[in-house]
Amino acid sequence: MADKIVLLPDNIANQIAAGEVIQRPASAVKELLENAVDAGATEIKLIIQDAGKALLQVIDNGSGMSETDARMCFERHATSKIRNIDDLFHIRTMGFRGEALASIAAVAQVELKTKREQDESGTYIEVDNSTVRRQEPVAAATGTSIAMKNLFFNVPARRNFLKSNAAEMRHIVDEFTRVAMSFPHILFTLTSNGQQLFHLEAGSLKQRIVQLLGNNYQTKMVTVKEDTDYMNIYGFAGKPETAKKTRGDQYFFVNNRFIKSGYLHHALMSAYQEMIPADSFPMYVLFIDLDPTQVDVNVHPTKQEIKFEDEKIVYAFVQAAVKHALAQYSVTPALDFDLDASIQQLSSIQQPFTDERKSSASSTSLFQGFTQKNQAHLIEKNSEGLRHWKDLYEAPKVPQPIEKEFPEEIPAALHAAPAGIADDAELFQIQNTYIVFPSARGFLLIHQQAAHERILYEQLTKASAASPIAMQQSLFPATLELTPSDAVILEELIPDLRELGYLVEPFGKHTFLIQGSPADLGHGNEKHIVDMLIEQYKHFSSELKFSRREKLIRSLARQQAVKGGTRLTEREMRQLINDLFTCEIANTSPEGNPVFLEFRQEQLEKMFGR
């Protein structure tokens, strides 16, 4: 019987290894940019076509390679960074495993042009499917240009797994941002399909953060800097008011390498405890420097996950450094009492404090006890002034006109609503967030935002399925300036937004004009709505099971819904309830959370031991 085990051909073995390192165009971006940094470049250009599927090119002015090195760099495990096993535990460079170029050459057509400063001519090499097709001398500037064309041309199954161009471009921008953030002293540019998306001049870390994450952080960051013998930490953290509902602006770097660490993120979040809502995420860009022997960077193929020798020390250090920074810059909150907005509506607050009322107040013994010297402790027995202290805070009673508001009819088919709801029931609002709706056998407690989200979600779903939502053009279009990564997202959403009543058009680099919005929506707030819509969309993007249209409808429903803390008139409450109980599914929000809870009389009596 013939033997079964054979050695794989080199090109097949390389393709399998490539799957570890090169999963999508963005993976190659990371590897090539890091190689350029390691080469000592001061200027690095990234050029993209067709979201990296057609072309992905990195040009640097670094040290370049000799003819022999240029040929060797495509071999598996060929590296200039490691000579013996001890070197593996003292890694300061970005790349070191020697598999990036071999992996790229296994799944793409690669053209390399490189030259060292001391050489008269450079070297040109063409490789595809792990085979060198051409090698010759060439005139070139000092540095290296490496172009990767037709990614996965020889692995069609993997090419089919790539997402839309907009989605792949978002991943590329993410990787570019991480490397550019880590090395602010290097000039970086990113050009996509002939349009320059980024031009990042060399400068300070703060300048680089603002260039990448937006001008709104310019005055809203605190400096984090702590040095010890064991480790140093430096960077910036956002003030509590900049915290968002979505992740995205959180960056940890260990020895200048971007890492993902839920453990360190938890340390930082604990520093913000009670300063921001539990479901919000602060912005931070933090660099940790420590001895390479204290950290293992080779526990994951992409090197984004690492292992610390002593995690607890690092955790405590990050937490303490951020806490100290927030305290030092006086951004810790003062005592903040939750003031019910309805208090502002009381007549005692609304009515002017007239001279007549002022005179009446100042003549009481209570007032005099606090204003005369050594009288604050004095309380007169049987004081008439004390008996009427409430009069100070009560407005004079003025007869109010009685306005009868007739209840609108609630449809008989109350989908998923408890039976026995009274049509003419009086409605109450609690904490400007919940609506109490009496029914024949108890009452419903309705969450107004969840109810409105359900209503809007069903309206938008039906409207988009039938025909585009009616749009009203703006006389004065709002201008929206976005960060490059958010601009990529909005560009992707423009066709779907048009179906939902928003006409958005590109207007130069990273700038858009909002030319129209849904006709039945209040106008003047379009800029804020679209801005927040992008945040909500990023939040829903983690749910892979949703289509783009579904994410957008959910985002719009969340953004346009009346928020908790908003005071509603009785007419508005009644309209909300009417609309809710005409929904196909009235008892849950689009996310599956309860819209209302029912409290029955027998339950209430049982709770009170009756």
Image: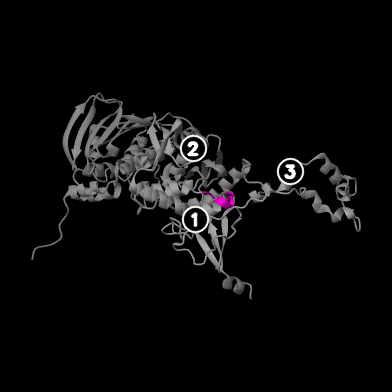
Q: Which residue is mark 2?
A: 523
Q: Quadrant of the N terminus?
A: bottom left
Q: Which residue is mark 3?
A: 351
* Disc nearer the start of the sequence (3/1): 3
* Disc nearer the start of the sequence (2/1): 2
Residue located 41% across and 50% down the image? 459
Magenta-span inclusion, residue 567 = yes
Callout 2: 10 Å neighbours few (<14), some, many (20+)? few
Mark nearest the camera among 2 and 1 is 1
Q: Is residue 202 left or right of residue 130?
A: right
Q: Give percent across and percent down for residue 390.
A: 80, 53
* Disc nearer the start of the sequence (3/2): 3
What amino acid type is highlighted by mark number 3? Gln
Q: Give percent across and percent down for residue 39.
A: 34, 34
Q: Which residue is mark 1?
A: 578
In the rendering, which numbered label is found on residue 406? Answer: none
Callout 1: 10 Å neighbours few (<14), some, many (20+)? some
Relative to the observer, which residue lies in front, 390 or 216?
390
Q: Give percent across and percent down for residue 333.
A: 63, 46
Circle 2 sits in a helix, a strand or a loop, which is it?
loop
Which secondary structure type mostly characterizes the magenta part of the structure?
Answer: loop
Colour scheme in use: one colour
- C-alpha span from label 2 to label 1: 25 Å
Q: Quadrant of the C terminus?
A: bottom right
Q: Is residue 311 visible?
A: no
Relative to the observer, which residue lies in front, 294 or 334?
334
Q: Give percent across and percent down for residue 564.
A: 55, 51
Picture layout, residue 551 above or below residue 585 = above
- C-alpha span from label 3 to label 1: 35 Å
Q: Is residue 50 left or right of residue 244?
A: left
Q: Is residue 364 left or right of residue 138?
A: right
